[in-house]
Image (cartoon, helix red, strand yellow):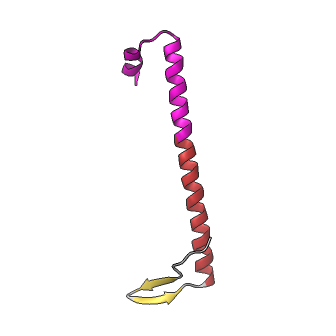
Amino acid sequence: MVLNNMKKIVNNIEYDLTTEEIAQREIDSIQAEQDRIAFENKQEAHKKAKASALAKLKALGLTEEEVKSIL
């Protein structure tokens, strides 16, 4: 991944990033993307689990209103 912003501003003075700072930004960017994907996967798993639970409750004979009251 190429980052376009390779400068930092400290006390209104612009500095070029060091190679270590550039490498850290790339690591942070990759980690942020992995965290975003993990969060989305967790949300999707939660939605699937909820839908499965609702289907099981309905299969047990609960009405739609009874299922909603549980939630």
* Horizontal side of residue 34 vs 57, given as left or right: right
The span picked out in magenta is 44-71
- Residue 60 falls inside the magenta stretch: yes
Residue 33 picture location, percent across and down: 57, 59
Residue at figure coordinates x 52%, y 36% from the top left = 46
Q: Is residue 24 above or below residue 37?
A: below
Where residue 4 sits, quadrant-wise, is bottom right
Quarter the N terminus occupies: bottom right
* Image coordinates for residue 16, horizontal then vertical, percent: 53, 88
Count of numbered badges drawn on the protein:
0
Residue 16 in the image: above or below residue 3: below
- Seen at 48% across and 9% down, the residue is 61
Instruction: Tell me the residue at 60%/71% (across/down).
Output: 26
Horizontal and vertical percent for residue 45?
56, 37
Q: Is 51 drawn above or below residue 5 in the view shown?
A: above
Q: Quadrant of the C terminus?
A: top left
Q: Is residue 49 above or below residue 1?
A: above
Magenta portion: prevailing SS class:
helix
Quarter of image, res 22:
bottom right
